[in-house]
């Protein structure tokens, strides 16, 4: 008699450490940024490790790949160089995606080899992988059948057969191939079906080819989020930070959460954002509870603009009036996506959710769209010009509102004085707008709130940053009389188009250069702040890298221009 397990209520998620996994797999899981198992993983992994056949009813994007990949890896006998696990997928894209996840999960398990096999790829590469003894074969039914006919793939040592997205394979006409493959695999094996639906043909296969399967049904909850405007941007991986800053400035976001996949990425992104002048701090699993509570308290008081966090760190975080959520990295599954974006648009208010998608992640966002049954729109990454235009429009609306409300201090005497000198009202207003928008010879408009102390929002800022620039550099004679040529041996002077009137400090300059270019602090010499420009001495060997990394970036609301100082 078949046992049946299903969930009407949302399931508790368990830490992977409680699922009976090997140290090697736990280490890989931690490296990938997983901190706890999803509901399907929590329920399926122990059952699969116990050796039972399984029928998993779960939507695409629920985290099921790891649910079957982890037990598959644990079952591999590394001394046996032959196929031991066969994973069938409906498309080459899914086969590649599954193979990549298997590779990541098996990275510390020496001797485990995975091999994707699908149509459109060279047979030579596949034959080479089979000859080298790959144990986990991930393939499409058509190409697997080709290898079986050629007798280049043998199934005698197969311990486990997994059908991923079985209903899609049925829709694509693979049912006869699946039946043939299952017939050729050893009878004493573990058989696993994962499917979003169970049409009659799939039920027939389950009755024929499984032995007392455990049925695991995970019902997704709260998949509709109508009050949240959801969009995604296709970006190049190397441009993600620049695009993120463009989105923040273009959408005029001043308060939100940015989600990353790993603790390391959280640390790295906070460093980048802080270097560019945003008030950001981090929250992830390596922080103590006291540290987390301190950051949350600061965020709730709006002492931060952005909280950069992993999924687990932000779980249960309840913050009012958050403007938006940004997925810097895609979540592992659809449930985590729903949980993430649920941080905004609370209490009946509208919210915004923006997701950056790089490379092959396009397949993952498509799975999330199917899983959530939601409408996630693809939008174009805004250009620098479009961001500037949006900022101008925002400024116009603010100016208009201020004039209409009349809540501002009057400066009639100053305006009258300028009128008496022959300046027209239009010229005076234009000059003020020019100044407020960061005109080259004037101070910019009040920028976003000051960033927190220290590069990571704590008190660890280099104390030397609070000293005079020349003293910090350890050379009080570092500047010639015209401030043009560095007297420090091995240093070259750069000129930046920001200064004191842009509300910049020497510590900001130092943090930005070190954070963006990843050079050592010792590579930065004297920093001389003037009203509208800053002169910075940089070691000669680092100059090209510094210019390449910081020229053109958005720094505290200004497009940074960097050039060699020539007097």
Image (cartoon, rainbow, N blue to C red):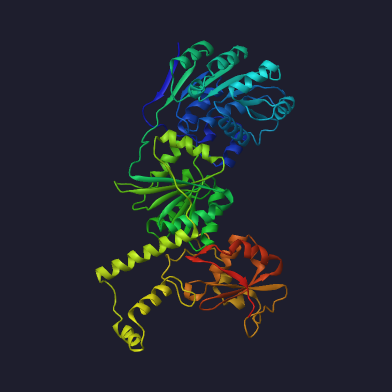
Kindly identify the residue that appears in the image at 59 percent across and 36 percent down: 26
Kindly identify the residue that appears in the image at 63 percent across and 23 percent down: 143
Location of residue 387 with respect to 33 vertically, above or below: below
Residue nearer the viewer, 449 or 171: 171
Q: Residue furthest bottom?
A: 420
- Place residue 250 in its image quadrant: bottom left
Q: Is residue 212 visible?
A: no
In this rendering, would 348 be left or right of 329? left
Quarter of the image that includes the N terminus: top left
Tag count in the figure? 0
Location of residue 357 with respect to 143 vertically, above or below: below
Q: Is residue 4 visible?
A: yes
Location of residue 238 with respect to 153 vertically, above or below: below
Measured as percent of width and height from the top left, residue 385 is found at 47, 61
Location of residue 417 with respect to 199 vertically, above or below: below
Residue nearer the viewer, 73 or 358: 358
Measured as percent of width and height from the top left, residue 159 is found at 62, 19
In this rendering, would 347 be left or right of 365? left
Measured as percent of width and height from the top left, residue 114 is found at 65, 30
In this rendering, would 561 be left or right of 334? right
Measured as percent of width and height from the top left, residue 303 is found at 41, 61
Q: Residue furthest left?
A: 405
Quarter of the image that includes the C terminus: bottom right
Kindly identify the residue that appears in the image at 61 percent across and 78 percent down: 470
- Place residue 115 in its image quadrant: top right
Residue nearer the viewer, 79 or 425: 425
- Place residue 371 in its image quadrant: top left
């Amino acid at each position: 008699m078949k046992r049946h397990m299903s969930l009407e209520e949302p399931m508790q998620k368990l830490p992977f450490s409680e699922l009976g996994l090997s140290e090697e797999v736990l280490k890989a899981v931690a490296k990938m940024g997983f901190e706890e198992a999803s509901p399907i993983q929590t329920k399926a992994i122990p059952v699969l490790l116990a050796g039972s056949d399984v029928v998993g009813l779960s939507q695409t994007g629920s985290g099921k790949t790891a649910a079957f990949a982890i037990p598959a890896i644990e079952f591999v006998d590394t001394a046996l160089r032959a196929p031991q696990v066969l994973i069938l997928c409906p498309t080459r894209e899914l086969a590649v995606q599954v193979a990549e996840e298997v590779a990541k999960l098996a990275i510390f398990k020496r001797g485990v080899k995975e091999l994707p096999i699908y149509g459109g790829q060279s047979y030579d590469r596949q034959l080479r992988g089979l000859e080298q003894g790959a144990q986990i074969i991930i393939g499409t039914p058509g190409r697997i059948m080709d290898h079986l006919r050629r007798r280049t793939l043998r199934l005698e040592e197969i311990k486990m057969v997994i059908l991923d997205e079985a209903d899609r394979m049925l829709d694509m006409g693979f049912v006869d191939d699946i039946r043939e493959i299952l017939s050729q695999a050893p009878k004493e094996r573990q058989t696993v079906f994962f499917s979003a639906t169970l049409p009659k043909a799939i039920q027939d296969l389950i009755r024929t080819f499984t032995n007392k399967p455990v049925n695991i049904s995970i019902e997704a909850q709260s998949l509709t989020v109508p009050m949240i405007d959801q969009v995604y941007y296709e970006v190049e991986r190397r441009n993600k930070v620049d695009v993120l800053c463009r989105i923040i400035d273009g959408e005029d976001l001043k308060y939100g959460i940015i989600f990353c996949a790993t603790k390391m990425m959280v640390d790295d992104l906070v460093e980048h954002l802080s270097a560019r002048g945003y008030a950001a701090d981090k929250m992830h699993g390596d922080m103590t509870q006291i540290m987390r509570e301190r950051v949350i308290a600061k965020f709730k008081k709006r002492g931060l603009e952005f909280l950069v966090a992993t999924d687990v760190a932000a779980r249960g975080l309840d913050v009012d009036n958050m403007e938006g959520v940004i997925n810097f990295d895609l979540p592992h599954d659809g449930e985590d996506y729903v949980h993430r974006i649920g941080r905004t648009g609370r209490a009946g208010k509208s919210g915004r959710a923006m997701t950056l998608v790089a490379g092959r992640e396009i397949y993952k966002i498509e799975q999330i769209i199917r899983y959530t049954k939601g409408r996630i729109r693809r939008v174009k990454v805004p250009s620098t010009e479009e961001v500037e235009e949006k900022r101008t429009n925002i400024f116009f609306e603010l100016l208009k509102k201020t004039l209409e409300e009349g809540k501002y201090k009057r400066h009639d005497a100053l305006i009258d004085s300028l009128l008496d000198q022959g300046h027209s009202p239009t010229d005076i207003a234009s000059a003020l707008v020019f100044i407020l928008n960061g005109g080259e010879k004037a101070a910019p408009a009040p920028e976003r709130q000051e960033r927190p102390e220290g590069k990571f929002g704590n008190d660890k800022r280099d104390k030397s940053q609070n000293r005079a620039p020349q003293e910090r550099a350890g050379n009080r004679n570092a500047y010639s009389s015209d401030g043009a040529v560095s007297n420090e041996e091995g240093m070259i002077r750069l000129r930046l188009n920001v200064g004191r009137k842009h509300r910049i400090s020497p510590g900001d300059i130092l943090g930005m250069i070190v954070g963006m270019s990843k050079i050592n602090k010792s590579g930065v010499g004297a920093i001389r702040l003037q009203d509208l420009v800053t002169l910075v001495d940089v070691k000669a060997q680092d100059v090209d890298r510094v210019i390449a990394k910081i020229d053109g970036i958005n720094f505290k609301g200004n497009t940074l221009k960097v050039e060699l100082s020539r007097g």
